Amino acid sequence: GAVVSQHPSWVICKSGTSVKIECRSLDFQATTMFWYRQFPKQSLMLMATSNEGSKATYEQGVEKDKFLINHASLTLSTLTVTSAHPEDSSFYICSARGAPAEGYNEKLFFGSGTQLSVL
Amino acid sequence: DAKTTQPPSMDCAEGRAANLPCNHSTISGNEYVYWYRQIHSQGPQYIIHGLKNNETNEMASLIITEDRKSSTLILPHATLRDTAVYYCIVRVELRAQKLVFGQGTRLTINP
């Protein structure tokens, strides 16, 4: 099956710094990528949807200036948490949706997640 | 997308069949039932999906009632590695852009 690689798997940073998380589709072209966050013992919460070459669409309540999303190519999307604070500590997960021609249209493939801890 | 209701937790003995129910009474005719699972500290994994007919693959079987208002995911011979949170999601297959997760069922397989 399709593989989505997410890096890093965990990161610890100081308050006020920025952290970048990468999400790559390894064997298919991801026309759309999604970013989720998940707090302990809670479900995944969709943060934003990004389409290659266009601006991301953010869910209500998600600050677009704080969570910068770039989807510059069909295989790479990045999430940058700017000026991180302890309350941003969470598990961040990306997912990718393939192009219909590649037969992946009906499934979403997920990365392994990034645990962010802000001190 | 239609809402789904799942029990918050279930237990099952190793080697037995695990049957996870999901209610989706407001499902529309063009909405599919998807199942994903999330093992602790990992990203969700696709299991199976279906529209009307029962489906089976190497991981599980999906039984959808005739009125499509509920479904059951069956893991035929549960192992300890099947311990995870299982999410039942209803969505339009081709037009919907995003996957919205509910609370899911925390399935624990006991030795």
Image: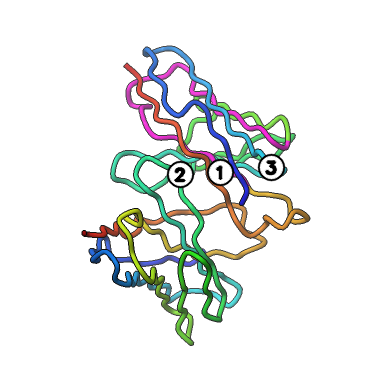
Q: Magenta stretch: residue A110 in it? A: no
Q: Residue at x 58, y 40 (%)?
A: A4
Q: Nearer the viewer, residue B13 or B89?
A: B13
Instruction: Give the residue type at disc 3.
Output: Asp
Kindly indicate the quadrant of the structure image that contains residue A51: top right
- What is the crowding at mark 1: few (fewer than 14 residues within 10 Å), some, or many (at least 20)? many
Q: Is residue B102 above or below residue B30?
A: above
- What is the crowding at mark 3: few (fewer than 14 residues within 10 Å), some, or many (at least 20)? few
Q: Which residues are magenta?
A: A74-96
Q: Nearer the viewer, residue A89 or B26?
A: A89
Position of residue A30 measured from the top left corner of the image (x, y, whole percent)? 68, 43
Between circles 2 and 3, the one closer to the viewer is 3
Q: Report whether A73 appears left or right of A25.
A: right
Position of residue A97 measured from the top left corner of the image (x, y, whole percent)? 64, 49
Q: Residue lying furthest bottom in this view?
A: B66
Q: Residue at x 68, y 49 (%)?
A: A98
Between circles 2 and 1, the one closer to the viewer is 2
Position of residue A65 measured from the top left corner of the image (x, y, whole percent)? 54, 24
Q: Secondary structure at mark 1?
A: strand
Distance from the alpha carbon under mark 3 to that under mark 1: 14 Å
Q: Report whether B66 appears left or right of A117.
A: right
Position of residue A95 measured from the top left corner of the image (x, y, whole percent)? 56, 43
Give the residue number, with chain letter if any, for mark 3: A27
- The numbered mark at residue B43 is 2
Q: Secondary structure at mark 2?
A: loop
Instruction: Give the residue type at disc 1.
Output: Ser
Give the residue number, with chain letter if any, for mark 1: A95
Q: Nearer the viewer, residue A19 or B81?
A: B81
Q: Nearer the viewer, residue B40 or A99?
A: B40
Instruction: Give the residue type at disc 2.
Output: Gly
